Image (spheres, rainbow, N blue to C red):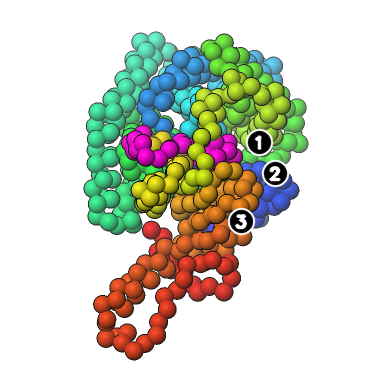
């Protein structure tokens, strides 16, 4: 154990405990995030037993933040983000100002330094966690919706405000500090720092727009033509991490914002869907380490030594962010449902609050106990966030029955008029072949595709396209499964496919469902959820190769009786699958 690498220890302890406690949390009907945070507390320096390297854990957590924001950016186009600027830009700026004022007032009432300390604490209590909010949108499959676009734009503005605060606080520290200092504040230097920061932000945006939108897709297209999936995955990771690092080191942009812009630039490429799929496994794994790292920073004794202080700051976050977000979105023209959901989703603080508090501590603007309270506030608000969202969801289901009160995406899901048709989920390499052949045969076809750009690029009038995630019950309802003849689930993700198959079977028990798989375990999973037939691609390749050999009379097969393996139709007693995941 003494000779083990700190990196290995962090990964084993972090992932192992996060898995165990996350599973326990799910069993107790809690969010798995609760388990991840407790795992961090367990291996942190403030609890007995093994202590992981907190600095290394934070560095690994940054990878999760980068990949998460890169993946989110892949689901946006610049036009979609600009479409919500009328709400997101003024709304986020005013929300940060209002929340900062409330947070500063709370800091003053709690006896912390009223000027510099109160300002730093106020800003820290006003910036929502990007990774928590984006995970919320992804779990509810509403990233590509009006609500998702507004929240993404809101977070981008908050990120920019944080960058400006990190630049200006050191310059203003002598003025804000309550301790005597010989330093003087040059307002010309402050204005110069502000102008320089804004110029760097503009330069990064211009560089990505003019150069990045040509170079990044071109690199991925070149690698894709090599036919190497391994190289393509490496290219995606290199671009995501490289652009985020360059944005941070050269232009002073946060890693999260740099990765988001890189993904958004790539979103206009036809390869964006494949890029998202390749980064997904690592993204989810390292995102878990973010929550573990938050738990490691928290001193549980704060719950005993300063419980009322913690309660006050938690209430300040919940009320300041929630109320200001709700009122501002309503004033700026957003619907009540969108305002209520955004208010709940943003009512937590996270990674940028820690960075601000560390900077304030280094500049001697905030006391050490304030940092512990802010960390505790982050953990409590992150734990409360799923309950808030569940409560908001219940209110919306009860009080938002009219279609006019729903978001734009829900309104756009008009039920299909097709009858006795085939539904194809996914228009990738497999789904496009299936849908095209069905259309040529004269059968009515409806394709469900999550990536809107694929739908726009296709423009085929011989079949009907529905943009959305097929795991969403509203999308399946609009696809007319009750009157459909066939359902082809052509996406490669077995977990999502299982959800789709299960919901489809409940909607239409007589529907014929065909799905695809790579492994026997996936085949069994899909069959148990209601698929009539599951086709394993590798097995079909083997059949075609053997059929070709038999057809051309190879001597090796002369006189031998050989029957190629049939497609999987039963969940048990099957031979092993291959490891190729194309």
> Which of the pair 389/259 is nearer the observer?
389
Classify 246 as above or below 22: above
Classify 45 as above or below 468: below
Q: In the rendered structure, which disc, 2 or 3, sits on the residue that comes first in sequence? A: 2
Mark 3 packing: few (<14 Cα in 10 Å), some, or many (20+)? some
Q: In the rendered structure, which disc, 1 or 3, sits on the residue that comes first in sequence? A: 1
Residue where numbered disc 1 is placed: 386
- The answer to whether residue 181 is seen in the rendering is no
Classify 232 as above or below 180: below
Residue 412 locus on image (x, y percent): 50, 27
Please tell me in which quadrant of the rendered image residue 558 appears. bottom left
* Mark 1 and mark 2: Cα distance apart in space: 8 Å
* Mark 2 and mark 3: Cα distance apart in space: 24 Å
* Mark 1 and mark 3: Cα distance apart in space: 27 Å
Return the mark for residue 529.
Answer: 3
- The answer to whether residue 253 is seen in the rendering is yes
Q: Nearer the viewer, mark 1 or mark 3?
A: 3
Q: Secondary structure at mark 1?
A: helix
Asked if the magenta segment contains residue 461, the reply would be yes
Residue at 59% across, 48% down: 504
> Which of the pair 224/54 is nearer the observer?
224
Quarter of the image with the N terminus is bottom right
């Amino acid at each position: 154990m003494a000779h083990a690498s700190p990196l290995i220890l962090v990964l084993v302890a972090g992932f192992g405990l996060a898995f165990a406690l996350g599973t326990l949390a799910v069993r107790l009907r809690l969010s798995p995030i609760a388990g991840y945070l407790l795992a961090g507390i367990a291996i942190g320096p403030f609890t007995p037993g093994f202590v992981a390297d907190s600095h290394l854990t934070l560095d690994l957590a940054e990878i999760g933040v980068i990949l998460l924001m890169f993946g989110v950016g892949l689901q946006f186009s610049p036009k979609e983000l600009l479409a919500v600027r009328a709400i997101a830009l003024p709304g986020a700026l005013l929300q940060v100002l209002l929340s900062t004022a409330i947070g500063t007032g709370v800091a003053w009432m709690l006896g912390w330094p009223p000027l510099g300390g109160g300002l730093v604490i106020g800003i820290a209590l006003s910036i929502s966690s990007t990774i928590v909010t984006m995970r919320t949108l992804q779990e509810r499959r509403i990233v590509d919706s009006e609500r998702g676009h507004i929240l993404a734009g809101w977070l981008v503005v908050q990120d920019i405000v944080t960058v400006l605060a990190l630049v200006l606080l050191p310059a203003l520290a002598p003025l804000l500090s309550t301790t005597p200092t010989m330093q003087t504040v040059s307002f010309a230097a402050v204005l110069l720092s502000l102008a320089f920061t804004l110029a760097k932000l503009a330069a990064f945006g211009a560089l990505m727009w003019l150069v990045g939108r040509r170079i990044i897709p071109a690199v991925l297209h070149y690698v894709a033509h090599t036919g190497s999936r391994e190289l393509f995955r490496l290219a995606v990771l290199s671009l995501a991490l490289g652009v985020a690092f360059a944005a941070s080191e050269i232009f002073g942009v946060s890693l999260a914002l740099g990765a988001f812009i890189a993904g958004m630039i790539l979103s206009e490429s036809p390869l964006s869907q494949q890029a998202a799929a390749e980064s997904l496994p690592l993204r989810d794994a390292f995102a878990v380490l973010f929550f573990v790292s938050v738990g490691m920073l928290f001193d549980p004794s704060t719950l005993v030594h300063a419980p009322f202080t913690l309660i006050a700051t938690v209430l300040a976050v919940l009320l300041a962010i929630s109320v200001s977000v709700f009122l501002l979105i309503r004033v700026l023209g957003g619907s009540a449902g969108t305002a209520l959901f955004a208010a709940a989703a943003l009512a937590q603080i996270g990674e940028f609050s820690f960075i601000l508090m560390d900077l304030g501590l280094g500049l001697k603007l905030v006391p050490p106990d304030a940092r512990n309270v802010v960390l505790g506030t982050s953990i409590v608000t992150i734990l409360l966030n799923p309950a808030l969202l569940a409560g908001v969801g219940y209110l919306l289901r009860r009080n938002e029955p009219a279609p006019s009160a729903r978001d734009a995406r829900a309104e756009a899901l008009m039920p299909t008029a097709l009858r006795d048709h085939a539904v194809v989920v996914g228009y990738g390499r497999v789904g496009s072949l299936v849908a095209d052949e069905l259309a040529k045969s004269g059968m009515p076809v409806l394709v469900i595709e999550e990536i809107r750009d694929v739908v726009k690029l296709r423009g085929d009038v011989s079949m009907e396209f529905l943009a959305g995630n097929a795991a969403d019950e509203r999308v399946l309802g609009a696809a007319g499964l009750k009157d459909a003849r066939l359902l082809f689930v052509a996406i490669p993700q077995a977990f999502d496919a299982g959800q789709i198959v299960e919901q489809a079977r409940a909607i239409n028990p007589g529907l014929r469902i065909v799905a695809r798989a790579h492994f026997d375990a996936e085949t069994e999973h899909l069959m148990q959820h209601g698929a009539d037939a599951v086709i394993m691609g590798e097995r079909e390749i083997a059949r075609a190769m053997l059929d070709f050999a038999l057809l051309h009379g190879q001597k090796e097969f002369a006189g031998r009786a050989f029957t190629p393996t049939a497609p999987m139709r039963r969940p048990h007693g099957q031979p092993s699958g291959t490891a190729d995941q194309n």
